[in-house]
Image: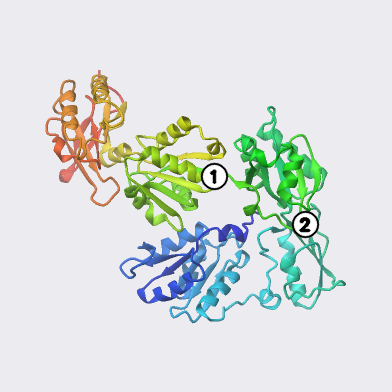
Amino acid sequence: MNHRSPAQFSAQSPAIIILGQNSLSVARQILTVLPEAKIYGLANRTQNVDISFNNFGETLKELFSQGTPIIGICAAGILIRILAPLLSNKWQEPPVLAIAEDGSAVVPLLGGLQGVNHLARQISAGLNVAPAITTTGEIRFQTTLLSPPTGYHLANPDDAKTFISDLLAGDSLKILGNAPWLTESKLPISPDGNLTILITEQLITPPKNCLIYHPTTIALSFLPDPQTTPASAINQLQEILTQNQLSPKSLSAIFTLDRDVNHPAVAEIAQFFNIPIRFFPQAEIPEKTTASLALKAAGKTSELIAKSANFSLAIAEFPIDINNTGHQRGHLAIIGTGPGAEKWMSPEVKDTLKTATDWIGYKTYLDLAEPLRTNQTRHESDNREELERAKHALNLAATGKKVAVISSGDPGIFAMASAVFEVLERENNPQWDTLEIQVCPGISAMQAAAALAGAPLGHDFCAISLSDILKPWSIIEQRIAAAAAADFVIAFYNPISKERRWQLAKAKEILLQYRSPQTPVILAKNCGRVGQTVKICTLQEFNPETADMRTIILIGSSQTRIMPRPHGRLWVYTPRRYEK
C-alpha cells in the first residue's frame, strides 16, 4: 500500500477557500498561524484574494486531487458532497476542514491520517476557539499512532485499528526504543504493558499486539566507481539491507560528494527508495571514503553498521535532520507556459511551477503563470536580459533552491533554454555542476497559431526569428529566401518592435519573389490570452503594419489552402501530399 506521510502534505501550502467577502476577515486570521497558506476567492463575490476561481466544485476537486490541504470557510455539507466521489484511499486524502463563516467552529473532516487534527488545533489557536476533534484516540492520548511525525514510519498500519481499540478498552503498553513523541503523550505506558510499540531499524515480522515504527536514523553514503551502474548500485544496496535485516524505511537520505551528485545511480537510488539526496563538498570529507561520509552525515555519536564497495551505513540515536545535514541539490527547470492560457500548460509544467521555490522571468511571462503561484518568490527582469537572467537562475539554484525559469511558448524555441545552456558552457562555474537541470516543453506560439487557424503546418515547415539583435539581418534575409525557395511553410517569430519597423516589410518583399500573391498568411495575436485575434489573408493583402511583438505570422507554402466555411469562417491547411 502506498502511504503518503504527513510531511508530504505539509510541504504544500494550504488553500483557504472563501465564497463571499464576509469570510475574508476569518481567512486573514487563519493566515496569522498559517502564513504560507493562500486565499482562494470566488470570482465576482470576493476581492483582494490571492487566487480567484469561477467554478467552486472543480477548484475543490483539483486541489484535493493534488494533495493540497483544504480549509473551507463554508458549510461542512458542501465540502462533503463535492469531495465524496473522490474518496477512495484514506492514506492519500489531504487534510480537509470546514470553518464557520464567523470563525466560531473549526471542524476537521478528512485527512485524519495526514495531520488534519494538528492543523485544526493550529487554526483554532489563531481563532481562539476549541477545535471540534472527534477522534477518540487522539482526544484521550494527545497523539495519533496512525500518522507519526516526520522521521518515523509505521510499518504495520493494518494492525493499528485493533491496537488502538485495545488501548481505548484499557490496555497499557510498553515502548521499546527512542520515541520522544510517544513518551511525551498521554498514552498508558507501563513496563508491564501487554501491548508493545517497537522503534527499530530492523526489518522484522510484527509480533502480536505490537506496532513497529522505523526511525530514519540511517545515513546512507555512496561513492560510485567507473563500473557502477544504477542497476548494480541498487542491487548492491538491497543486498546490504537484506544481509543486515535493515528496513529501507530507516534510510534518511543518500549522501554523496559534490563531484558525484550527478552520477545517474544517485538519482535512481533516491527514486527507488524514495529518499532525498544530500551532498558534501569534497573539502569537508578529507578521506573521501564512504565510511567517513556516512559518519559525517549521521553525527558525532553515530556508529558504522555496514560497508561495501560503494556504500556505507551509519546509524544515529535519533532521526537525522536532513534539512540541516549536508547540502540540498539545487534544481533548475526551464519551463514553457505555452501561449498563455492555463489549459494549454502541460501537467509537468504546472507541477514544476507549484513545487518551485522561486520563479524567474520577464514580468509578462510571470504574470501568465501567476494564478498557479502559492508561496514562490518572484524575480522579475527585463525581456532583453536573457543571459543575466540565466546566470541569476543558476546561482540561485546552486544555493539549494528549486528554481523555475519561465518562458512563454516552448522554452527551447527562441527562448530561455538556450540562454541557460549558453551561460552554463561559457562560464563553467563548478558550483553549477551539482545542479539538476530540466527542460519542460510547452506549446509553441506557432503550434497555437496553427491550431487556431486549422492545420497550416500539415507539411514541411520552419521557424525564423526576424529579430536582428542577436544575428545580422543579412543572415535572416538568406534564410527567408532559402525557406521560400524550398517551399516551406514559414513561421515568423519576433516580427516587429518599436525599434524594428522595416524588417517585416522587407521579408514580404523577399517572399513575393518566390511565392504567389495568393499565398495564405495567418496573423495570430495574443494566442490564449486576453485580446486573442486570428486574421487570415493573402500575401498580397498582408499589411506588415498590422503586426506587433505579440503576433506570430505563418506564411503558407505553394500547397497551403484557404477553405471557406459557412457563416464566413475560414480554415487554412497544408495537404500532407504534394499534387504532381
Q: Identify the residue under disc 2.
A: 317
Residue drawn where x is 56% and y is 81% of the image: 130
Instruction: Specify the quadrant of the image occupied by residue 226.
Output: top right
Cα gap from disc 1 to disc 2, whole angstroms = 29 Å
Which quarter of the image is occupied by the C terminus? top left
- Residue 122, relative to residue 421: is it above or below? below
What's under tag 1, amino acid-wise? Gly
Residue 465's spot in the image, x, y percent? 28, 31
- Residue 524, relative to residue 517: is it above or below? below
Residue drawn where x is 32% and y is 43% of the image: 383
Mark 2 neighbour class, 10 Å CA radius: few under 14, some 14 to 19, many 20 or more: some
* Chain-order first, disc 1 or disc 2: 2
* Residue 132 vs residue 166, the one in the foreground: 132
- Residue 227, relative to residue 236: is it above or below? above
Q: Identify the residue under disc 1.
A: 330
Residue 488's spot in the image, x, y percent? 27, 24
Mark 1 neighbour class, 10 Å CA radius: few under 14, some 14 to 19, many 20 or more: many
